[in-house]
Image (tube, rainbow, N blue to C red):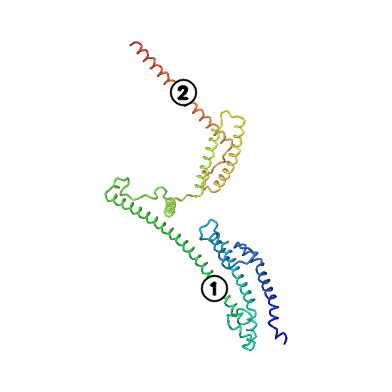
Amino acid sequence: MLLWLHRGKLYGALLPLWHLSLRQLSHSYRRSRSLRESYRLLQLPEDKDSSQAEVKEAYLRMAKLYHPDSGAPTADPTLFSQIEEAYRAVLAHLARQRAAQQQARSGAEEEEEEAKAKGQAPQHRHYLSYEGVGAGTPSQRERQYRQFRVDRATEQVLEYRRRELERSSLAEEGALSARDVRLRSRKIKITQAVERLVEDLIQESMARGDFHNLSGSGKPLRKFDHNPYVDPMTHNLNRILIDNGYQPQWIVAQKEIRETVDKLRAGLLGYRAKLGDPLTPAEQAQWQQHCQSFSDDLVRLNKKVDNFNLIVPLLSKQMVHFSLQRELDRALQADRERRLEKRRQREANEERDRANTNEHTRQGLLSWVQNLLK
C-alpha cells in the first residue's frame, strides 16, 4: 500500500535510471561497427548525435560526388550504393533514438494508461492491430507504429528514387543505342543509293551501246576452259571465295613472313647507314648490340617459317630458314654500294661545279678582254 500510495515518488526516483538505461542503449547502437562505418561513409562525426537534416545534407553532398549520373570525375556506382545503405542505416538509428527518447519523456503517462488498460481487453488482443509492430502499452505501440510507418515511407521514397535513377540511366543507354542504329541505317541507305546510282549509270551506258566494242561481246562465257577436270561446283565455290577476298591461311602466313623480313632488312640497313665507315670502337659495340637484337628477331621469324612449312599444301612452296650471317653480309654489301653511289654522285656534282666555275671564269675573261680592246 505504501508503494502504491507513493508510486509517484518512486517513479520520480526510478526515472533517471530509466533515462540512463535508454541513453546507454542508444550509445550501444551508435558504437556498433556497421554504424560507425555508415557514419564514416557519410563523413559525419561519431562522437556526437547528428540531426536528420545534417544526415540528409551529408547524403546529398556525397551523392553529388559519387552518383553515377552526377557527371563528376569521382562518380562510382559501387561506392554510391554503399553510401545509400549507410544513409538508410543512420536514419533508422536516429529513428530508434527518437523512439527511445519519446518513451523516456512519456513514462508517467504510459504508467497511468497501463493502469487504466489493465481491466480492458486481454493482452493478446493488443497485437491484433498496428500490423503486429511494437511492444508495451497501446500508446507505446501506437507511437512505435507511427515511427515504423515513417521509416517505411522513407525507405519507399529512397527506393523509388533509386529506381527512377536506374530507369533514366537505362533510357540514356537506349537513346545511345538508337542513335547508333540510326547511323548504321543511314550508312546502309547511302551505300544502297550509291549502288543504285552505279547500276543506273551502267544501264544507261548499255543502252547507248558503250559496251558493244568489248572483246568477246555476244559470245558465251568460258568459265571452265582452264581445267575441264575440275568439278564446276568446286570451281564456283572457289570463285565465290576469291571474289569475297578469302585467302588461305598459308598465303596469309607467307605474306606476313615476307613483310617481316623486308622490315628487318630495312631496319638493319638503316642502322648501318647511321654509323661511320670505318667503324669506331664505340660504333662497333653499338653495331654488335644491334646485330644481337636482329638475331633474336630472326629466331622468331624462323619459328614462323616452321609453322608455315607445316600448313603449306605444296612442297615447292616451303621456305628455308633465314641465315644471320647471310643477312649481315647482304646488309653490309648494300651499305657499301649505297656509300659508293653517294660518293660517285658527290664527285659528279663537284666536277660539274668546277666546270661551271671554269666556264664563268672564261666568260668573264673574254668579256674583260673585249672591254679592254674597246
Disc sitting over residue 111 in the figure: none
Q: Quadrant of residue 61?
A: bottom right
Q: Which residue is mark 1?
A: 153
Quadrant of the frame with the N terminus: bottom right
Q: Residue at x 61, y 38 (%)?
A: 292
Height in image: 374 above or below 346? Answer: above
Q: Is 14 situated left or right of 217 in this image?
A: right
Q: Residue 123 at what x, y percent from top left?
A: 64, 85
Q: Residue 170 at what x, y percent from top left?
A: 48, 63
Say what amino acid the circle numbered 1 marks: Ala
> Pointer 1: residues within 10 angstroms few (<14), some, or many (20+)?
few
Q: Residue at x 37, y 56 (%)?
A: 189
Height in image: 174 above or below 304? Answer: below
> Pointer 2: residues within 10 angstroms few (<14), some, or many (20+)?
few
Q: Quadrant of residue 327?
A: top right
State the separation of the CA atoms marked 1 and 2: 97 Å
Height in image: 263 above or below 363? Answer: below
In the current view of this chain or complex, which residue is farthest to the bottom?
119
Disc sitting over residue 350 in the figure: 2
Say what amino acid the circle numbered 2 marks: Glu
Label 2 SS:
helix
Label 1 SS:
helix
Q: Quadrant of residue 46?
A: bottom right
**Foreground residue, 237 or 365?**
365
